[in-house]
Amino acid sequence: MVMIREIKEELDTIISVGELFDTVEYDYPSFHLSMDCFWCEVIEGELKLLEAEAAKWLNKGELDSVQWLPADITLISKVKAVK
């Protein structure tokens, strides 16, 4: 699966992919974004940011501490609502 390979390349971690959480559809001025978002679990390794320019890990209580891109706002609200 492409997602497993990408996570391995960018985070040096092996994951298992769970169920679809949401699909984000958003129209930016120059393109349309369609992004499927899945629940995943780390099954081997620790998450290491290998290719990110700027990133930080947030727990659920810290999600409001960053300014999200417009396409992410609905998804973040759904993540915060999960018990």
Image (cartoon, helix red, strand yellow):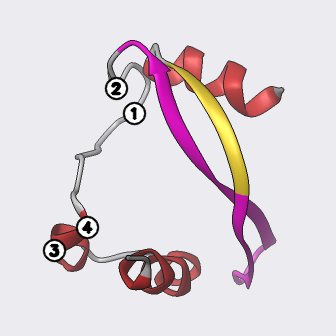
Question: Which residue is label 4 attached to?
Answer: 60
Q: Viewed as shown, does residue 46 lie left or right of 2?
A: left
Question: Which residue is label 2 attached to?
Answer: 49
Question: Which residue is label 1 attached to?
Answer: 52
Q: What distance separates the C-alpha of mark 2 from that of mark 4?
A: 19 Å
Q: What distance separates the C-alpha of mark 1 from that of mark 2?
A: 6 Å
Quarter of image, res 21: bottom right
Disc 2 marks which amino acid?
A: Leu
Q: What distance separates the C-alpha of mark 4 from that of mark 1?
A: 21 Å
| Kind of element beneath mark 2 | loop
Question: Which residue is label 3 attached to?
Answer: 65
Disc 4 marks which amino acid?
A: Lys
Span highlighted in magenta in the image: 20-45
Residue 39 horizontal/vertical position (percent): 59, 52
Residue 17 horizontal/vertical position (percent): 68, 38
Q: Please state which of the two labelled residues, at mark 4 or mark 3, is closer to the viewer.
A: 4
Classed neighbour count for the residue bearing mark 1: other residues with Cα under 10 Å, few (<14), some (14–19), many (≥20): few
Q: Earlier in the sequence, mark 2 or mark 4?
A: 2
Instruction: Locate the C terminus by quadrant.
Output: bottom left
Instruction: Locate the N terminus by quadrant.
Output: top right
